[in-house]
Image: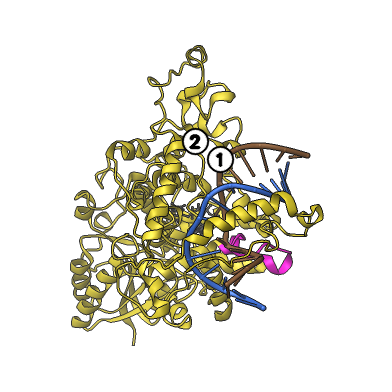
Chain colours: A yellow, B brown, C blue
Amino acid sequence: MATNTILWFRKGLRIHDNPALLDACNNARHMYPVFIIDPHFLKSGSYRVGVNRYNFLLESLQDLDSRLRERGSRLLVMRGKPEDVLPKAFKDWDVKRLCYEVDTEPYAMARDEVVKSLASEACVDVNTFISHTLYDTAELVKKNGGRPPLTMQAFTKLVDKMGDPPYPATDPPAKLPPLSEDAPGTRPEDTCVPTWQEMGFKAPPSTLFKGGETEALKRFQMSMSDASWVAAFEKPMTDPSAFEKPATTVLSPYLKFGCLSARLFHAELLKVYKQKKHTEPPVSLRGQVLWREFFYTVGGHTPNFHKMEGNPICRQIDWQDNEEHFNAWREGRTGFPWIDAIMTQLREWGWMHHLARHSVACFLTRGDLYIPWEKGMQVFEEYLIDQDHFVNAGNWMWLSASAFFSQYFRVYSPVAFGKKYDPEGKYIRKFLPVLKDMPTKYIYEPWLAPLEVQRKAKCIVGQDYPRPIVDHAVASKACIARIGVAYRAGRPSYAGADDGETETASKPVKRKSGNVKEKKAAAGAATAEDEPAEAKKAKGAKRQKKITETLKPSSDSS
DNA sequence: CAGATGTTGAGGCC
DNA sequence: GGCCTCAACATCTG
Ligand SMILES: Cc1cc2nc3c(=O)[nH]c(=O)nc-3n(C[C@H](O)[C@H](O)[C@H](O)COP(=O)(O)OP(=O)(O)OC[C@H]3O[C@@H](n4cnc5c(N)ncnc54)[C@H](O)[C@@H]3O)c2cc1C
């Protein structure tokens, strides 16, 4: 018997690969596609979202509405809280089934639990579908023995074991079940997509990227159309300073909002890979989609993933907040043009290249300022158009050497790193026009320019552009030393799992400290004197250096 | 338990 | 652009 259904959009702002949409159409007399906006939530200021991402969302809703209209339906943008709006709609529209895509973010899980119980009180069936991620991440965790894998290698193996993810769902019928036009609360003027002004933003959006499924598919097709580029993609080799044409796909905001299906992306990549020799995860383009899946999997199954405290995989480090330094970083006035340009791109575009994010994240945390990674994550949360809870937190832990990555002594230089890609500083000149006439020689270090040069460039350091807030050489050394102390003081609590310990307090590392130095000395001597020249040529011996053991660990007292 | 490896370091050298 | 060294962590493998 035909019934009335609600299709509740939250993420998954698309028509393609949308199993919840198919289910909501199934046997439906009237289907009500709903998106709920809580205007007070936004205005209360407790929600960290800037106008660029918010407007991207509004554009995505607008596009969704037109695509629904092409199919004889339309989007109802309801104002209020889900726990008020939905029960009322159940009654008003005589709804028997609520369909939506699963969202595993903590706040979404809590929200959906409340809605589920309200639906059950109203005798409304709830059908949910996993289509934001490639897999059901809970299944991945189960298959991995009940805990998420914490390295990309382990994760890739696990995914291999799982087999290919579900193929994208079929397209919905050309004609969707219509709304009942006399249904209360559905008048177009009451349910249209608001503007950013109506949502209380004062300044207009400045990003170049337009939201919506139409734009997502266009951009996706564009990226995939160059099969050689797709097949040869190697993430670490891409250029963070490219801005005329970004070096990576910029599909992230579309994947974040579900304007583009990750499964469609993945399936199309496999098609290209069938035809061509290709790179492999983690560096390949498919690898990038797996990184997203990785952070969703770990994040969705780790308590307090977005915090240091109470987070079992996170190193407990004695970060120190410093308001002055933090504000300088956030506002792009650290005095390092490479850093400040990236932070400007963040505010203006809401998107930066992955390695640009590395540069500024490293600088804020383990590289120079020693400020808590959570502070940086919150700034990204406000300004990124692709802000994604688990991905953002996971990458911030990575960069701050708090989880996943532990080579904290490898520090990005706020001067040298950018220069490698963009010796002329085009990227800096683009985002920091105050430096546009600074000679190339000084573009990464304007404080070194003689005053005469600064005058000629119409940019006096300390006046038109700030002096550097730290001496990188000094600051990075201090950071490395300090993190070293924190590392030696304890390990994240998950590490206790091996020997059955599960308490939350970090436990000290058991380690004999004596032998480290001896090894170093011996190895140094060996490389200098004893190594035959041809040994150096050993194929693929990139890191084979520390050669045959001339060192005897014998005298190593315990 | 040593040795290789880990998406993406810098700096020197060729 | 590749290779080496700097100093040095965690994890996997045989
Ligand atoms: C400190 C920091 C914070 C970050 N915060 C976010 C965030 O909030 N949201 C976000 O989507 N990405 C985040 N990233 C990851 C990465 O920088 C972006 O996903 C990527 O730059 C987006 O550009 P793209 O779509 O052109 O990437 P491509 O290289 O074209 O990759 C394709 C897709 O793979 C996924 N992907 C790529 N790299 C990563 C990664 N490292 N982790 C997870 N997924 C990845 C994205 O969905 C991306 O769209 C962050 C990185 C860092 C270092």
| Residue A279 within the segment the image draws in magenta | yes
Q: Residue furthest right?
A: A534
Mark 2 / mark 1, whichever is N-terminal = 2
Q: Is residue A65 visible?
A: no
Residue at point 57%, 75% (across, down): A157
Q: Respond whether the residues carrying marks 2 and 1 are from the same subunit.
A: yes
Q: Of tags 2 and 1, which is closer to the observer? A: 1
User: Is residue A102 shown above or below A419?
Assistant: below
* Residue picked out by circle 2: A338
Label 2: chain?
A: A
State the CA–CA distance, disc 2 to disc 1: 9 Å
Disc 2, SS = helix
Instruction: Give the residues drawn in magenta, as a range.
Output: A272-287
Amino acid type at circle 1 is Phe
Instruction: Please state which of residues A306 and A483 is positioned toward the viewer in this rendering.
Output: A483
Q: Is residue A457 visible?
A: yes
Q: Where, quadrant-wise, is the N terminus of chain A in this rendering?
A: bottom left
* Residue picked out by circle 1: A417
Instruction: Please state which of residues A413 and A517 is positioned toward the viewer in this rendering.
Output: A517
Q: Are marks 2 and 1 in contact (CB under 8 Å)?
A: yes
User: Is residue A356 shown above or below A153?
Assistant: above
Disc 1, SS = helix
A220 vs A359, left or right, is right
Label 1: chain?
A: A
Residue at point 36%, 60% (across, down): A489
| Residue A145 within the segment the image draws in magenta | no
Instruction: Please state which of residues C4 and A153 is positioned toward the viewer in this rendering.
Output: C4
| Quadrant of the image occupied by residue A110 | bottom left
User: Is residue A471 shown above or below A440?
Assistant: below
A550 vs A346, left or right, is right
